[in-house]
Each structure stands twice: as structure tokens, then as C-alpha cells.
Image (cartoon, rainbow, N blue to C red):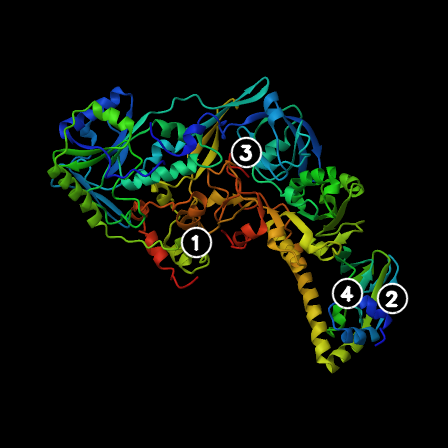
């Protein structure tokens, strides 16, 4: 038998990374136009008990016949009876999911990817910055932090959406504020009756005064361009790239670093990311078409 | 790989030609499917071999950028050529394979691995550059946090009989990549062809076991000299040089260099280079459903970063020009591969140069980026 | 030197913080405080207006008129933000309507007096222009991001997803 890298000892001790598990839809919550939240539960009891994820990680949801889609988990990481996925209608697979009912099954592989750096935030201010569909991957951070609120200094959520009716999870903001999260919102374009901010998220950041930039961690999730300009504004206010974390996105297929699709420079977004420290990933984010 | 075997310390002996012919029977009796070089469609490809007669006896190849043709030799050498369009990845990482099977049952969808037996291959005629390529793909498919089970199973059973090159093609540059032409490690047996047989070097216990079933004789000093000379011939014939000093930093700090536009004018984005490259590993997964829709298989197929749809995301293409796709291929192969896997992704086999329809030579493309510009 | 009462305020506001004490004194001497109730208009699009404002507290909304669509909000501004920069650039008419959304307190500086101060003292002029340029550049970036509609759903337009390919 050929001797070659230590993986020889790992044969058969790992489940096949390509094969999905069965998950059933327990609940569907309509959020905003084109977006719904699915509570999934793994059918196999052992697998369900063993499933554990950290905020920022994602699953590959599989609709046989349509394909897979990478969806971040957006629920409470400390309560995994069901796994929460907020999904936006974007293509073939998500269109099929959108037509599914409670009780139907699909495939699930996961959890994959790197997670938000919660362990670095103890005793610090934390600014969560989300844009549009970028709020779901940050919600597990909110849940975790609010469950241990005294561990952190000032907590902020700066949230930008396209328009007032496209804001996600609005019914939770009151509770979050009451639990010690300073929630500030803005919209790109206004709508009749909107009395809140109109503008972009970097502007919300410019108006934040009660935080010491040296004792702050920032986590940003949203379109690439929003993350770049938010990071830029943060650094203009005295933060460094080592204090800023972003969640990136690329064409995700295998989620295990074997198919090559999700590469950005030397990084495989699926296994080296999707959460990166900004100084690590920004040189590659800035190159057009890399 | 474990320690580098010093090829000077390997047990070596002489295998007469008629005994080499028996190797096929020995392997068949051990239930190996022998894969090796054979002539097909005017090229030397890797396919099933049943006897010594399937080998390209008396053939050689003439290769240049964008050109490949076979010519007759004056002798009857069995391995008197360099590498062709196929590589061993075709068998370890098949172009099409089933990853998982889904069945719709009363309890919903159930997923499982496909029921297939793992092929038991004996690779006959693996060159030094290909040994390096196998190690690189081992690192890709089994050395990371997730192991590719299909690859691993085939690899664990594969027998590797290497062949030392006794000549080089004009497109070879293994010496620049430190991968050849001498076979140093990663084989069960290594052969050097002489006119009447082979010098055999034993790399593993399994190789020794197989050799025991053939009648070998002690190798004479004269034969050893002839074998060394034959191997030296390969070294002497290598024309191409590729300076890879600081290549990672050179490429990554020149991502907007005009040379990319230059090569983009010539590149057809045809994916030939990625198909023939022995280390390229990109793939896609497709759904294959039966008519009822209750039985769906996930199939993995070779893909290429040159394919237009490869970088599709959210309604658009991240790499939406040939320039960006060529840049991705080359910077990955020669630069970011080092970050990811610890070595270069290139083994200097020259296939991409030979099989590019317009003869793009990546060694020249790199050389065109002036080293002073950093 | 006795502090002008408004100097305290200028020191805290983002727009004027960092100016030398002397410059803040000069500015303070041509400024005054003003209050607007929620719902009050500060100036209207197309009007000729002589004042420039730095918001001290509250929130204002910038909107522009499109026939049959009304006055559409394009931006909101808060404490520290500059409003009415057109005045100092002597552009003639205001380019948008600005109204208070909440009870708002502003520092008002007469644009003509400010311009005269800058013409007279180029050092302070440079400082003021620098700050106006910085404020406008941030506003420009914001505007571009809004125009790019980065949260919009742009999928399904040019390239249909391959069946089976992840999205």
C-alpha cells in the first residue's frame, strides 16, 4: 500500500463531506419581500444532538434536482433544537425552497466556515454593522452577546437597508434595545411615513461618539462595497484593520475547499472564511475581478 | 510523504525484458487494473493495458508550444517519449463521478454514498513530474480539514510503477521546478529502460513483494552505468528554464500588470491547460435526476476557472473577462497555491504549453513581468 | 482671552473641532444659535439663502422636489453635520429643501460674513474650506453608495444560474 500524507489514518474516521443529512422544515416565517426564515431540524436524533455551530457559520441546503445553496445560520447558537436560516430568493435553489411547506425535507451539510471573533470582545465595545441581507449572519452574535451582556462594554448595531419596508427583524429591535444593544438604522431611500435616518451606514458610524476606538471590535456583514466603505470610515475614526472583521461571499459549491470555486486570492471563502479579519482579506477585496 | 528516500540507497536489480512482459500477468493475478501509456488518436494517452504489446513500442513524441505529434523511433523502446495529454488524475479524480445519491421516501429525502467498489489501479509508467503531481493532489484532496473520500479510497489502493525519463520534450522544465527527471520517492517500483530490460529500484515493501514474483538478476556495474547515462540524457535534453525566484511575491504584487492584457489577447479561455494539467482540481457538482424525480444523484464533474460561469455569483460573474480568468489560473498555479498547500502547483511537465492551441507558455508570461517592478 | 459663549459649542462639534482657539473665537463672533421645531422648514430648494448651519442637536432631512412625486427625502443629518454649504460657495440658489424632523438646534453662520472672514484671513479660510471639502466628500461617497443600490436584488438579470450550481 502506498504511504503518503497522514490522511491515511483518517480514512473512514470522518463522515463523507459530500453527503448531506436529512432536515425537515419545522416553521416558515415570512420576513420582508423575497425573504423568509426557515426553522430546520435534522431528522437523525444523534446528528441533531451533536450539531453545534458558532456565529458566522453556514450550512449548504440541498434541494435534490435543483442543487445546493450556502445559507448562514441566523438563530441562537445556544439553542440548536432547530436551525434558523433566513433565505433571500435569488436563484434556482432558493426559488424551490420558497415553494416548500412545513413538513417537507431537504438536505443539509454543515456547519462550515470560520466564525465571528466573540472571544476577542470581552471587555470591549462592539460595533456590529449590517447591510440588507447581511443582518442574518450577525444575529447569532447579538443573541450570544445579549445573553452575557455584562461581558461587554457598549454594544451597537448599525443597520442599513434599501428602504424602510426591507428592514429585517424589526419586531426584535425593542427587545434588543431593552437588553442593552444600541440599535441605529438607516435606509438608502425613504418611504412615506419614515421619520428615521436616510443615508448610508458609514454615516451612522461617523456619528457614533461614545466609543473608544482602541477598545473596540467591529464586525461587518453586507455587500462588498458597503464593507469596504464602512471599514474605511472606521479607520478614519481611529480603528485599525486588525480590529475589524468582515464576512465575505463567493460562488460556493462544495463548502469544503475541494472544488475551487470560492477562491479569493489564496483564501478559500468556504474554509478560510467567510469571516476574515479585515487586514487579511482587504488586499484581495480591492482587486477588481480577482 | 514520509522521509525523502535517497534514490542512491534503494535496492536495485535488473529485470530482463521477457520478465517485464510477465509483470502484466502478475498484476492481473493480483486483481489490479493496469493503466499505462498506449497510442490512441495519434497521441500517447493513459488507458487500460493488458499486455506489453499495448505499450507504445518504438514511438516517441515531438512537442512544442501548441504542437504535439508522434514519430517513429529507430529503436524499440517501450517508454521512449515524454508525457501526453492525460495524467493520472483521470483515474484518481475521475472527470465524472457520483458523490451521493438521494431517494425520496415516506420519511422524506434520504441521502447516502453511491454503492460502488473502488477500482484497484496499477499505474505503469509514472514519470517524476507526475510523482510530484500525485503528491500535490494528495495534499489538496486529503491534506486539508476535509478529506475527499472518493480520491482517498482510490489512492490508497493504487500501485505506482514509475519510469525514469531517458529523454525530454522541448516543453519540459521539471529541472526548474525540482521535480525531475529523476524519480526520487512516491513509487513502489521505479524502472529505467535499457535495450534489453530495466534497472528496477524498489521503493516500498509492496514493490518488493511484486518484484519477488518476477525473475530478476543482480545488476552489473556496466548496466548501472548505462542506466545512469540514459537518465542523464533526459537532463541534458531539457531546454526550458523557468526562474521561480520570489515568484509568489512577483505575481501577487503585479495583479494589474499590462502583461495580463497581453496574454488575454491570445488566450481563448478554452480550458485545455486545466484539463491536461496534472494538478488542477477544480470541479462542479451537477444534479442528475431520474424521470420520477424521486431518485437524484449528485455528480462531480471537472470544471475549469477558465469557464465563463465558474465565478458566477448573485447574477453576475466575478471574473468577467479572459484577462481576469487567465490571471486567476496563473496566480493560483504559481503563487497562491504556495499559500494554500505549501508548494508550487506546477511540476514543470510542460503539458499546458504543448496543448494550448495558441502556444501560450506560462514560463514566458512570467518572465515578461519585469522583476524590478514590485 | 474671554471665551465667546458659542466657542464652547464650536469646540465640541465635529465640524469645527480642531480649529485653533483663535479661529474658533473669530467664527464664534459671527455665529448665533437658532432653534427649529420638528416639522419646521429651514430653507427651501431654489431659494436664495445666506446662512450656513452646523447642527448641534436634533435631526434634519434633505429632500428634493419632483413633480407629482412630492419632496423626496434623500439624506438625513444630525449633530456635527454641515447644512447649506451652497451659500458659502456663492452658488445662488439652494439645491435642496431642508426641514427639521426633530426639534433641532443649530449654529448659524452668515455666509457673507464667513466669506469675508476667509478672504481676509486665508489661514482660517483654508481650514474652513478643508472641512467643507471633507464633509462633501463623505456626502459624495454616501450618495454613490445609495445610487449603486447595493441592497437591491440584481440576480437573474444577465446570467441564469446553472442547474445544480450553488447560487
For this view, does C101 lie left or right of residue B227?
right
Q: Which residue is mark 4?
A: C83
Depth order, front residue of A216/B161: A216
Depth order, front residue of B202/B161: B202
Q: Are marks 4 and 2 in contact (CB under 8 Å)?
A: no
Q: Are marks 4 and 1 in contact (CB under 8 Å)?
A: no
Question: Callout 4 environment at 10 Å: few (<14), some (14 to 19), or many (20+)?
Answer: many
For this view, does B8 lie left or right of residue B151?
left
For residue C10, above or below residue A170: below
Q: Say if residue C30 shows up in the picture.
A: no
Q: Are marks 3 and 1 in contact (CB under 8 Å)?
A: no
Quadrant of the rendered image containing residue A117: top right
Question: Callout 1 environment at 10 Å: few (<14), some (14 to 19), or many (20+)?
Answer: many
User: Disc 4 versus disc 2: distance between alpha carbons?
Assistant: 13 Å
Question: Callout 3 environment at 10 Å: few (<14), some (14 to 19), or many (20+)?
Answer: many
* Number of numbered labels in the structure image: 4
Q: Which residue is mark 2?
A: C34
Q: Which structural element holds mark 2?
A: strand
x, y percent for residue A191: 76, 50
Amino acid at each position: 500500500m502506498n504511504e503518503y500524507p497522514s490522511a491515511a489514518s483518517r480514512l473512514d474516521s470522518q463522515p463523507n463531506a459530500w453527503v448531506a443529512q436529512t432536515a425537515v422544515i419545522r416553521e416558515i416565517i415570512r420576513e420582508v419581500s423575497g425573504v423568509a426564515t426557515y426553522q430546520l431540524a435534522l431528522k437523525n436524533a444523534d446528528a441533531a444532538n451533536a450539531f453545534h455551530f458558532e456565529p458566522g457559520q453556514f450550512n449548504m441546503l440541498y434541494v435534490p434536482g435543483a442543487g445546493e445553496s450556502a445559507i448562514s445560520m441566523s438563530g441562537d447558537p445556544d439553542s440548536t433544537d432547530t436551525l434558523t436560516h433566513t433565505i433571500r430568493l435569488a436563484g434556482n435553489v432558493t426559488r424551490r425552497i420558497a415553494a416548500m411547506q412545513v413538513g417537507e425535507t431537504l438536505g443539509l451539510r454543515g456547519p462550515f466556515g470560520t466564525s465571528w471573533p466573540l472571544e476577542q470582545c470581552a471587555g470591549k465595545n462592539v460595533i456590529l454593522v449590517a447591510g440588507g441581507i447581511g443582518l442574518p449572519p450577525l444575529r447569532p452574535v447579538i443573541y450570544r452577546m445579549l445573553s452575557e451582556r455584562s461581558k461587554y462594554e457598549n454594544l451597537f448595531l448599525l443597520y442599513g437597508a434599501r428602504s424602510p419596508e426591507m428592514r429585517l427583524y424589526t419586531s426584535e429591535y425593542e427587545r434588543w434595545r431593552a437588553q442593552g444593544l444600541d440599535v441605529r438604522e438607516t435606509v438608502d431611500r425613504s418611504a412615506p411615513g419614515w421619520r428615521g435616518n436616510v443615508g448610508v451606514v458609514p454615516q451612522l458610524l461617523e456619528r457614533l461618539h461614545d466609543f473608544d476606538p482602541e477598545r473596540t471590535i467591529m464586525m461587518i456583514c453586507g455587500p462588498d462595497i458597503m464593507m469596504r466603505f464602512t471599514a474605511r470610515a472606521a479607520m478614519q475614526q481611529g480603528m485599525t484593520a486588525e480590529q475589524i472583521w468582515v464576512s465575505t461571499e463567493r460562488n460556493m459549491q462544495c463548502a469544503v475547499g475541494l472544488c475551487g470555486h470560492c477562491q479569493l486570492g489564496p483564501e478559500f471563502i468556504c474554509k478560510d472564511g467567510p469571516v476574515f479579519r479585515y487586514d487579511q482579506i482587504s488586499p484581495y477585496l480591492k482587486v477588481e475581478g480577482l | 510523504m514520509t522521509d525523502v528516500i535517497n534514490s542512491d540507497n534503494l535496492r536495485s536489480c535488473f529485470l530482463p525484458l521477457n520478465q517485464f512482459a510477465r509483470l502484466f500477468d502478475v498484476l492481473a493475478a493480483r486483481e489490479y487494473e493496469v493503466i499505462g501509456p498506449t497510442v490512441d488518436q495519434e497521441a500517447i494517452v493513459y488507458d487500460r493495458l493488458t499486455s506489453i504489446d499495448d505499450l507504445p513500442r518504438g514511438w516517441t513524441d515531438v512537442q512544442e508550444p501548441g504542437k504535439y505529434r508522434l514519430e517513429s523511433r529507430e529503436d524499440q523502446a517501450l517508454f521512449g517519449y515524454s508525457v501526453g495529454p492525460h495524467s493520472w488524475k483521470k483515474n484518481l479524480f475521475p472527470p465524472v463521478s457520483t458523490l451521493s445519491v438521494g431517494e425520496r421516501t415516506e420519511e422524506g429525502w434520504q441521502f447516502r454514498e453511491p454503492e460502488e467498489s473502488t477500482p484497484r489501479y496499477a499505474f505503469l509508467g509514472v514519470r517524476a513530474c507526475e510523482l510530484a503531481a500525485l503528491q500535490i493532489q494528495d495534499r489538496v484532496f486529503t491534506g486539508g480539514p476535509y478529506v475527499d473520500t472518493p480520491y482517498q479510497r482510490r489512492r490508497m489502493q493504487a500501485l505506482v510503477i514509475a519510469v525514469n525519463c531517458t529523454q525530454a520534450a522541448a516543453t519540459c522544465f521539471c529541472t526548474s521546478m525540482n521535480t525531475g527527471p529523476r524519480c526520487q520517492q512516491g513509487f513502489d517500483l521505479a524502472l529505467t529502460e535499457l535495450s534489453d530490460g530495466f534497472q528496477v529500484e524498489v521503493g516500498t515493501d509492496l514493490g518488493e513483494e511484486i518484484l519477488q514474483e518476477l525473475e530478476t538478476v543482480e545488476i552489473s556495474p556496466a548496466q548501472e552505468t548505462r542506466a545512469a547515462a540514459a537518465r542523464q540524457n533526459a537532463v541534458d535534453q531539457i531546454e526550458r528554464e523557468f526562474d521561480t525566484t520570489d515568484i509568489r511575491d512577483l505575481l501577487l504584487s503585479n495583479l494589474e500588470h499590462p502583461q495580463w492584457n497581453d496574454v488575454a489577447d491570445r488566450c481563448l479561455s478554452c480550458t485545455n491547460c486545466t484539463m491536461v494539467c496534472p494538478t488542477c482540481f477544480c470541479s462542479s457538482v451537477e444534479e442528475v435526476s431520474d424521470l420520477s424525480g424521486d431518485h437524484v444523484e449528485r455528480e462531480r464533474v471537472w470544471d475549469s476557472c477558465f469557464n465563463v460561469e465558474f465565478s458566477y455569483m448573485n447574477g453576475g460573474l466575478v471574473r468577467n473577462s479572459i484577462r481576469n480568468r487567465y490571471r486567476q489560473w496563473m496566480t493560483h498555479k504559481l503563487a497562491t497555491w504556495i499559500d494554500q498547500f505549501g508548494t508550487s502547483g506546477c511540476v514543470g511537465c510542460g503539458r499546458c504549453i504543448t496543448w494550448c492551441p495558441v502556444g501560450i507558455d506560462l514560463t514566458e508570461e512570467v518572465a515578461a513581468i519585469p522583476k524590478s517592478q514590485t | 482671552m474671554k471665551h465667546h459663549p458659542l466657542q464652547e459649542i464650536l469646540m465640541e462639534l465635529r465640524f469645527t473641532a480642531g480649529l485653533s482657539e483663535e479661529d474658533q473665537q473669530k467664527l464664534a463672533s459671527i455665529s448665533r444659535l437658532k432653534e427649529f421645531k420638528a416639522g419646521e422648514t429651514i430653507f427651501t430648494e431654489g431659494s436664495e439663502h445666506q446662512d450656513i448651519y452646523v447642527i448641534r442637536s436634533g435631526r434634519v432631512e434633505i429632500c428634493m422636489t419632483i413633480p407629482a412625486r412630492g419632496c423626496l427625502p434623500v439624506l438625513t443629518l444630525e449633530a456635527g453635520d454641515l447644512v447649506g454649504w451652497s451659500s458659502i460657495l456663492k452658488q445662488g440658489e439652494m439645491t435642496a429643501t431642508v426641514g427639521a424632523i426633530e426639534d433641532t438646534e443649530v449654529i448659524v453662520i452668515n455666509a457673507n460674513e464667513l466669506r469675508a472672514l476667509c478672504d481676509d484671513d486665508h489661514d482660517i479660510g483654508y481650514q474652513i474650506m478643508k472641512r467643507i471639502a471633507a464633509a462633501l466628500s463623505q456626502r459624495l461617497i454616501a450618495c454613490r453608495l445609495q445610487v449603486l443600490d447595493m441592497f437591491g436584488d440584481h440576480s437573474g438579470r444577465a446570467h441564469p444560474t446553472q442547474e445544480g450550481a450553488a447560487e
